[in-house]
Each structure stands twice: as C-alpha cells, then as structure tokens.
Image: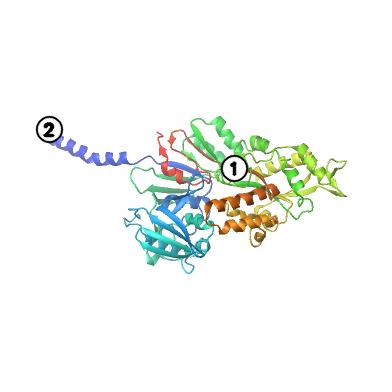
Amino acid sequence: MQFKQLIKTFLINSLIPFLFITNLSAKSIKIAISSAPSNLSPFYATDANSQNINRLIHLTLTDFTKKMNFECRLCSSFKERMEGKKHIINFKLRDNVKFWDGTKVSAVDVYNSWEYFTDTNFIKSKFALGLSRIKDVRVLNSNEVELVYDEYNPDNLSDLALLKIVKIDKKDVANNIGYEKIIGAGPYRISKSTELEVVLSPVAEGASELIFKVVKDETTLALKLMNKEIDLSLATVSPRKNFWLKENVKDISFHNVEGTNLIYLGVNHKNEFLKDLKVRKAISLLIPREKIIKYKLKNTATPASSFFSEAFSFLHVKDGEDPYDPKQSELLLKEAGFKKGEDGIWEKGSKKLALTFRVSNNKNTIETVETMKDFLKKGGVSINISVQEWGTFYRNLKQGNFDLAIGQWVGFTGPAILRFVFHSESIPPNGANRGFYVNKEFDSFIDKATTELDEKKRNNYYKKALEISNREYSYINLWHPNIIWIGRKCLKNLDVQPNGSFLPLLKMVNDCE
C-alpha cells in the first residue's frame, strides 16, 4: 500500500508542471490569408502580407494608430526639430525591451539596424533608398537616439514603419539574408514557414500561437469557416461571397471599417473633351456610386468624398461625394457647348463625346465598369471598354495612354502622396501624375506643405491643395474599399485598422472551444 501511495504521489507531482504549462498556453488561432508572403525577411518584405507579419515579429520606432497618427512602439516619446535645414527626430526608447536572445535593445541597435537597412554592398534591402534619407544616427545614450535628415520631408516619420530593429551576427550579413538569421524584439517568432502556412509562436507565455493559412479560393475559404477549420479570415473576399457568408454562415462576425485605399476614375486632362472641367464634373454626376456600392459591391465600400478616407480625420471631407444627377450633368454639357445627336450621344461640332475606358482583366472590376458604361450611355456619353491583362493595362496607365481608367491607390499613409500623384513635376517618368493634371496654385500649396515643419500650417497647406484637386476633378473619386475581417464570434477584442495592419491581432483573445 505504501508503495502504491508513493507511485500515486509521484505521478501527481510529475503532472503538476505540465498542467501549469497547459494553463499558461493560450489556444492557437487559425487565420486565413489570400496569398503567401513573398519574403519574410524584413529587408525584402514588400507585399502586404509579408509586411504585416513582420509587424508582429519585429519592433519599429513608430507605427500608425487607427486614426493614421504616429504612435510609439519601441520609443516612449519622440520630438522633431530643425537644425538649419536639417530635420532631427529625437527618440527616447522604452526601458527593458529585449531581443529574443535576452539582450537589451539599446540606441546602438537602432544605429546598427539603420546600417543594415541602408547597406548597398551586402544585404541590399529593398528599402535602402527610402531609408537613406536618414543621413546619420546619433546615439546620445543607451535609451536615446536621434535621426538626422538633410531636409524636412513628411515621409521621414512615415517610412520608419519600415525600419525594423534587429540584431544580426556578423558572419550572417549577406545578400538575401533569411529571416532565420535575424534576431528580433517583437512579440512573435516564426516557428514554421511553408508555401501554404506560416506559424508564429509567442515570445511571452500566455499569448496565442498564430497559424496563418493560405486560402486562395474563396469557396474553399467559406467551407473552412463553416467547418471551423479557420477562426479568422483576413483574406480578400468578393462582395458576392461576402454577402453569401453573411446570409448563410452562423456564428461568424464581420469586423468592418472604411479603409484608407482609394478606388478612382483616372482622367486624361490632355483629352480634347476631358480638359474641360464641366465635362469632368458632368461625367462624375453620371456615376451612381450609392447604387454600385449597394448592389454590385454589397456595401463593402464607402463613397469617396475626396482622396482621403475618414481615417485621415484632418483631411477628410464630409459629404463631399457627387450624387447621381443626370439633369445637372446635362446642364453642364450644354454649357460646355454640346448638343444631343440623333443617337442620344452628346456632340460638339462634328465630334461625338466618345471615350475609351481602360480596365484590367479583373472580373469584379469589369462588371463594375460595365455598369458605369450603361449609366454614362444613358447620360449621352459613348464609352468603349478596353479590357487588358494587368501588365498591358498598367503600362498604358503609366504612359497616360487612356481617356478614362479605373485605378486604385493602396498603402499610402498621409498627404505626401498628393505631390507624387498630382504635382506638375510628377508627370511620368518623374512620378505618377499619369493624367497630366497641371495647376500652379495646387503646386504652390504642395511645395509649401512639403517644407513646413509646423503641423497645423502644413496640414492647412495640404487642405488648400486638396480643395483645388477636388474642385478641379483631378481624379473622379469613387469609393474607399472597406477592410473586412471575418471571424468566429468567440474571438474577442478584435479592432480592425483602416490600413489593414495586423497589429490588432496582438490584443485578440481566443475564447473558442
């Protein structure tokens, strides 16, 4: 009996540590993404999934809030100042942040990381050019560092989301360095990576393991959600499938926020008709945005009142989107000297108002453009849709070889994009002013904003420039696609960000059985 009791006591005592460990380990969360990350090394992570997974693995000095403002990650605070023409950003670092190997993250590591990311001889990072605007990194003490730029640029702070703070053994510094050779300080580490799955293990006890599964087919995704093989989907889902899931799958929630990306109608300002503001506005008034969003996009987008969505609170224009108003469109075209022909198409002189509408061979986009064509024809505008494979479409877009073209801007983080897209000095090959929009007053405000350090003054200049852009119909703004995450109802603390960042996953709790 004593022997049996000893065995029983031994077994109980042996199991206690394992029971304790089990209680500390949170349940894993299975997450669907549409495509495999192209490269998980932070030096070459250019696609959205690679970038976002790296946000969970590595710390940066700053990142973005839900309102697209800057917030500290590694830093506890930061301040900007000018030294003559030089732009200086001072960072105070958080205490007791450690790399995965247990060593403390210090200002020296910020300096080293800058050298890694701007190295053009060995590592050759994809981000070397952008981060090379940092001309020096001053280590003031172990917890304080300053970044020195030759001049002020609104993107100086924005681009720091690309500067991951890392450690690398000297022998591993080489081109195409893999993620396995890089020591980070973020809350997760990669424990497995294949073409169809990436597994992130938490550094701290008690956090959930994150299993990213590549699910390219949305019908397969729907089945996996129904069968609870997927807890959360961050994958791209068509409006039609999104609507079907809402109607047919129980116990899932839709976490929806207006995104920062912009779908727009590009206009060639050199076109003999489109160079007239009245014609551009008339076309905008013939596009039934609300109907398209409701019936074609199944309410997965928000009408665009300007270039910037509601996330950019200081630039957002409330109630600025054009309504569907064919009568006002008709008045404008008459004022522009057009008359209706026998076939119902507007004419000016001997020329009909006929335009070529270029579009990529994306099924959903083609359907949307076909709807636009029908409404434009009802309004007296003849449209020839030219469907092209992506490479040809993009080449024509960059060369300005279009009358109208539907396009999308993704990943921009603030108003600095206005220079790249609309400034007269940004006409290709110097930028992305592919519609040849030229306005000296617009240029003047952008030039002032680009060099203004005072945030209020700078934002005011950008607002003035944006007002001109909206008034002139430099683009015909259409809508902002929503960021939609679909998850089981038992997932808690989900708060989607408008830029699609994966950072909210850090606060998510899995209460699923």
Query: 353 or 513: which is nearer to us?
Result: 353
Q: How is the image coloured?
A: rainbow
> Percent from the top left, x then y, of residue 180?
40, 57
In which image quadrant can residue 218 be found? Answer: top right
Q: Earlier in the sequence, mark 1 or mark 2?
A: 2
> Percent from the top left, x then y, of residue 324?
71, 37
- Mark 2 packing: few (<14 Cα in 10 Å), some, or many (20+)? few
> Percent from the top left, x then y, of residue 183?
38, 57
Report the Cα–Cα distance between label 1 and label 2: 72 Å
**Numbered badge on residue 336:** none
The residue at 72%/56% (across/down) is: 401
**Residue pushed farthest bottom?**
121
Tell me if residue 58 can be seen: no
Q: Nearer the viewer, mark 1 or mark 2?
A: 1
Residue type marked 2: Met
Q: Identify the secondary structure beneath mark 2.
A: loop
The residue at 79%/50% (across/down) is: 273
**Residue pushed farthest left?**
2
Q: Identify the secondary structure beneath mark 1.
A: strand
Q: Is residue 19 above or below residue 167?
A: above
- In the picture of the structure, the residue carrying the numbered disc 2 is 1
Q: Is residue 14 above or below residue 85?
A: above
**Numbered badge on residue 481:** 1
> Percent from the top left, x then y, of residue 9?
17, 37
Q: Quadrant of the C terminus?
A: top left
Query: 404 or 433: which is nearer to us?
Result: 433
The residue at 49%/67% (across/down) is: 120
How many labels were placed on the picture? 2
Tell me if residue 3 can be seen: yes
Residue type marked 1: Pro
- Mark 1 packing: few (<14 Cα in 10 Å), some, or many (20+)? many
